[in-house]
Amino acid sequence: MATVPSDIEIAQRARLRPISDVAGEMGVGADDLDLYGKYKAKLALDLSRQPPRGRLILVTGINPTAAGEGKTTTTVGLTQALRSLGHQATLCIREPSLGPVFGVKGGAAGGGYAQVVPMEDINLHFTGDFHAIASAHALLAALLDNHLQQGNALGIDPRRITWPRTIDMNDRALRDCVIGLGGAASGVPREERWVIVPASEIMAILALAADRPDLEARLGRIIVGATAGAARRPVRAADLKAAGAMALLLKDALRPNLVQTLEGGPALVHAGPFGNIAHGCNSIIATRTALALSDLVVTEAGFGSDLGAEKFFDIKCRIAGLDPKVAALVATVRALKLNGGARKQDLACEDLGALERGLANLDKHIENVQQFGVPVVVALNRFSTDTDRELDLVAERATRSGVPVALTEVWERGGAGGIELARAVLQVLDGGTARYRPLYATTLPIREKIDAIVRCVYGGEGADFSSKADRSIDYLESIGLGDTPVCMAKTQYSLTDDPTRLGRPSGFRITVNEVYPAAGAGFVVAQAGDIMTMPGLPKEPAAERMAVRPNGEIVGLF
């Protein structure tokens, strides 16, 4: 492979089209476009109400590893490739969070020659959506504590408050805190915790809302805590008269953001729930807008098929009435070798034995997508250290499963490196074999829905529940939240709840530690394993490499 400059160097050298031209290509005029400078814009909500004409393509992947898989990069590159073949294709992905950008990733807008731009803006403050979500979340928290201070007419039990605070930065010191200290004038002392903005229920609500009335209704249904005594009546944001002001703060954030790929194609980048602790998909409004304006829409779901894709199918598609037609499943030789027991430092060496063992992980992810009635194309993201024998072994395994496989080199070559994948996806689309269906009926009891996910998607033998989770499930079903989808929160690195168990484990059970409501979003969250909703920074944060030069140029963001 040729030497490829850093992501930010490529992005800074790119010649961007005026965003009004990108919008005009989609048939969007000035009246439906609010410009945020030359290269960013907000689209009108009315566009999402137009009848859909496009076909929806999902990009998912195997379990992520430290080797890197390039799922977002492949998603961008596939869209670029489809456009280079003459198709009207639009990209739909999530917004990056500042926490991972300054923590480990250093940027999350694709990579190499398959990026969305302006890269610096998208990775930093963008159009202010995350700030609006944080403000709406903070307003509800402030109104809640003010209610306690002003006499607590609703009878809220401070020990049963479930609404946390939020900030869009990795800060482990905020996981467990005490607030309200300093005397009677400073509030009611109680325990408190912070979550990162992508884990906020308001982020999920923004991503799942259909329009402004639906947004306000969902905000009002948020459960912030419960009353004292045996009754434990849930207290909602509507009881605090908070929904209207929160919707006001989110008025513009609800509108999807239009930017472009490096090759000048339209990209809707909107909402950013994490895939391991939230539902991991971009907004319904952005996806519907793209489907109304384009022939082909390429979107992605967070992490592997066991997390993001399952939630895409069981939560987003169910709520929005979407009908996905094909899924591209991203895999790499390097990641499969890690799943087969190879050491990270040995990945540059050919190891057919480790690869053979790791292919069981690929098999399971293929099966996961197929059980939702959606056909699969394996997108084999090529690295320079991959040998022909290794690539052939993966291709043979996929072919044996009746699944087409295509090599991609979009990081190095942009859309030109995704032509093989684009043609394979188009062939499956033209075959018309998709028959999307959710995994379970929402009318099933909560425990049975969780058990179905564990057995069918993770390949386990079932779910066990802590006493706390059992009590929570009984309570949630008693207050009418038994008929919702389930959003599983677990490690992304394994099909199990143990991040060290790679490959395709068998004979395991998942332990659900906690189940809690996301009543406004419209699901309940089941947490398994050691999951943190407030990450910490690593020993050497990506922020240490970043700076602004005297001429205003950003460095270190890659």
Image (cartoon, rainbow, N blue to C red):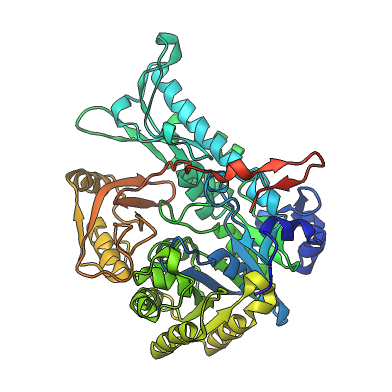
Q: Nearer the viewer, residue 325 or 85?
A: 85
Q: Position of residue 84 (x, y in %)?
A: 72, 79
Residue lying at 57% horizontally and 74% vertically, measured from the top left: 384
Q: Nearer the viewer, residue 122 or 334?
A: 334
41 up-or-down from 338: above or below: above
Tally the numbered discs. Answer: 0
Screen quadrant of the N terminus? bottom right
Please identify the quarter of the rendering in which residue 185 is found.
Answer: top left
Asked whether, in this view, residue 11 is left or right of residue 65, the answer is right
Screen quadrant of the C terminus? bottom right
The furthest residue to the left: 467
Q: Position of residue 544 (x, y in %)?
A: 60, 41
Asked whether, in this view, residue 124 is left or right of residue 337, the answer is right
Residue lying at 52% horizontally and 43% vertically, measured from the top left: 540
399 up-or-down from 384: above or below: below
Residue lying at 72% horizontally and 68% vertically, measured from the top left: 265
Q: Position of residue 129 (x, y in %)?
A: 61, 45
